[in-house]
Amino acid sequence: MESYCYVPFGIEPDCNQFRILTLSPGTGDQPLECVLQHGDIGSSPPYEAISYVWGNSTEKVEIICNGKPLVITAALGNVIRHFRSSSETRSLWADAVCINQNDNKERSRQVSRMKDIYSKASRVLIWLGEERDESESGIAVASDIAQACHQYVSNGGSLEDVTFNDELAQRLFGKFRDPSEFSRLAAFAKIIGRLWFTRVWVVQELALATEAAVFCGDASIGWTDLMAAITAQDRLNLWLSDHERNAYVFILERARREWNAGIRRNLLSVLFRYRILDATDPRDKIFGLSALIRSEIREAKALQPNYNVDTTELYTAVAEEILESSPDLNMLSVPPRIPGTGKGPCNLPSWVPDWTNTRLTAPLGLANYSDINELAFAASGPLRPQVEFSGRPAALGIQGHRIDRIAAVGTVLRLEYLPRTNYHGIRIPKCAFVLDNWSHVAGLQGCKPYITGEPIRDAFIQTISTESTHEKIETLRQQLDILERNATIARWLGFLPKFLPEWVADKVVLVAHAILFWRQTDEMTLDFRIHLSSLADRRIFRTAKGYIGLGSALAEVGDDIAVVKGARVPLILRARESKWTLQGDCFLKGVKQGEAYREDKCSLMWIV
């Protein structure tokens, strides 16, 4: 039988058409049959839009479309089969079948319309995948937590700052601390770890939805309820809650709230906030987010969906667009890709952000899901940048001067290299596993004061927190004491043989914790704990002049520290003949508000 052939849309620019999939009723393994029809986005009949993960593109199945066979991915086939009604037709929209994926021109044009497609859908159906890992139990406990959340809020509580110190919270959420709930909470944590939460396209698909429902196998929950449950789980530190993993969910919810409130961000804010999300096509890290950007920026040539341009060219053009319209150089603070974490686009200049890098590295002094434009420093004072571009591949010209050189570096805090951090309810802060090394590099073993005259231990803990908390120095000293006690536990864990069962390690940690924290609190303040987020993929370093800094994972001995006109934080540069390569930004204790910047020392520095 002749295969289905897509009917082209009308001629641009007046054409506002898209395709609606009308799914015929059926059950079980009966063949999937549908009709694809053109419709006008502004006046189409009601339809539901599907948000899902594409899956393995090499696994295919065949459906019957308009009476002819059409090959689609097996993942989409499973999704459509799940949403098929047994008794009536259902109108749906799914990108992989409603857009001709083999026509780059159509694909580019339809991608630019997805903002309208999702916003005009009667409902967005979020498909997390089939039932596995007790996911039905996980959805059930999420619904129970959400119900407790509604009661808590209706009685005047706020989920943003809920704690078990509150009597009402203790009464409503206390049952979820019982070990009998641990298996359900473990299933819930695995649901949050599903691949859907990590995909870049889901940002606009969720943000633009008038209503969204989440499906996992045969279980379902409204997005609002799911979000309430995850917020409570995170704030209350319930069993197996993972703050880094939850950050993925919070940035999705933040996008939805901001869109509904009419808040539109600039290009850098949008690309940075959702950089941790992945895409099958790296160009979609730009095109998949364009609907969320301010309208006056959205028309820039670099942002127009064009699947005939290569990734390096696209990312470089976008970087130039950002710098030409920005009052600062915050773009140069986008965390670089570190060795051993995959390969980025070929020949990408060091100053151009690699948006394929999905590692969760927070901006200096900010939480995991913060906006990079919230950087609260002013290393060059209030000055605006002076930039110029030259050649291909493009070189970036900036005005700045060197102030110091790195003399020693500590271990990089790579979260994937750490052992377990949760030992049957006792949590060890992740930075505790590198604290001994960092303390040695910073010189805490000595008794000399810091270069600014303050105690070296004070300078060290202020560097770790990038002087961004609201805590008094006395409180910060207490936080350092807690971290050092946890570092002792981490050191003891390092001596345990790898073959020991987990319950033995749990017992060791329990005993060590009881000894080290006898009549001492182990609870760090929320303000301090939040700012530990920016330690991931960074390392402590010491400079030739004696400064302590917190730098990127790429920082090495011999690299130069420069203050640059328009940059809010110092930059780490590495000489390459007469030019420089960017190795990331840094926090330098004592160089925060223009103390080291000298206009008369500035010269043109080319970064390649």
Image: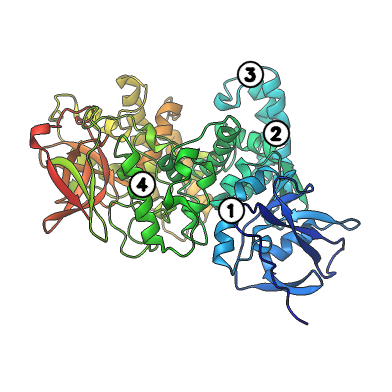
92 to 162, vertically: above or below? below
In this view, the residue in front, 218 or 19, is 19
Q: Which mark is residue 167?
A: 3
Q: Secondary structure at mark 3?
A: helix
Outermost residue toward the right in this view:
87
- Say if residue 347 shows up in the picture: yes
Q: Secondary structure at mark 2?
A: helix
| CA distance for labels 2 and 4 | 43 Å
Q: Amino acid at mark 1?
A: Pro
Q: Amino acid at mark 4?
A: Glu
Q: Secondary structure at mark 4?
A: helix
| CA distance for labels 4 and 3 | 52 Å
Rendered image quadrant of residue 334: top left
N-terminal-most mark, 4 or 3: 3
* 93 relative position to 589: left or right: right
Instruction: Read off the residue under disc 4.
Output: 321
| CA distance for labels 2 and 3 | 18 Å
Percent across and percent down for residue 238 are: 59, 36
